[in-house]
Image: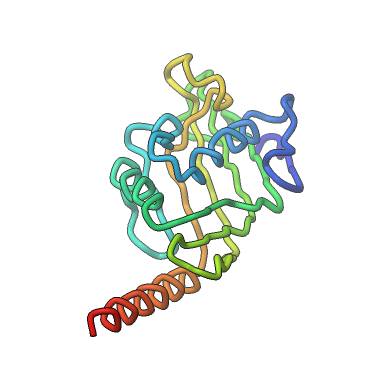
Amino acid sequence: MGKVTIHNGPYTAISENASPGLQFLKQFLPALDSLDPSRTVAPFLTPNASIIVGSQPANPGNRVIPLLEVRSKHLDRFRHDVHVVWDIEHTNADQNQAIQGDTRRTVMFEATSVTVFKNDPDQFEIKVKEFNVLELVSSPSSGQEDNGGLLAREIRTYMDARPVQDQAARLHSQSTYAESKAQY
């Protein structure tokens, strides 16, 4: 195993001279958290990237991107409050099939995701603890320097989504009740 770099605190506090994996995360999270449909995570993913949430089967990244874009219709706010990040550099000796100049990194981070629904009159913040693992590889093109020259080939997220699902169901039932009451 190569060098491990640790960052404590929000991703916005990652310095400009931090390790490549930390630089990647600093650029990736604003795109992931954005509710602006024109801002996408696609430039941060390899063409065959997979995204795994909990024990669910892997989904191709290109199938998940449209789901992220739908969030803007339902959410008022969404963000990741990062607590700690580990950026692990893999040396060529770590890899059986390593190619000279091929960079591989694993970025792991603990965070709390914060979700607020548009139709929530209380604007209640749903806070969910997460642990995320990003498997990064070097970008084949030179246009990804802002990403630390890296792309995600796999993203794994471990979290309990029930608080968000419960609030969505609660708000849906309240709006359905209000709509039916208005009809009479």
In the rendered view, tell whether residue 24 sits above or below residue 184.
above
| Left or right of residue 168, residue 130 in this image | right
Residue placed most toward the observer, 76 or 67: 76
In the rendered view, tell whether residue 182 sits above or below residue 87.
below
Residue 126 visible within the image: no
Total marks in image? 0
Q: Residue furthest top?
A: 142
Q: Residue furthest left?
A: 183
Residue 53 visible within the image: yes
In the rendered view, tell whether residue 178 sits above or below residue 31.
below
Residue 141 rendering spot, x and y as whole percentages: 43, 16
Q: Residue at x 49, y 21 (%)?
A: 144
Residue 173 rendering spot, x and y as whole percentages: 35, 79
Residue 34 rendering spot, x and y as whole percentages: 49, 43
Q: Residue at x 51, y 46 (%)?
A: 33
Residue 3 rendering spot, x and y as whole percentages: 71, 35
| Left or right of residue 172, residue 133 in this image | right
Q: Give the position of the N terminus as an image quadrant.
A: top right
* Colour style of the rendered protein structure: rainbow
Residue placed most toward the observer, 64 or 131: 64
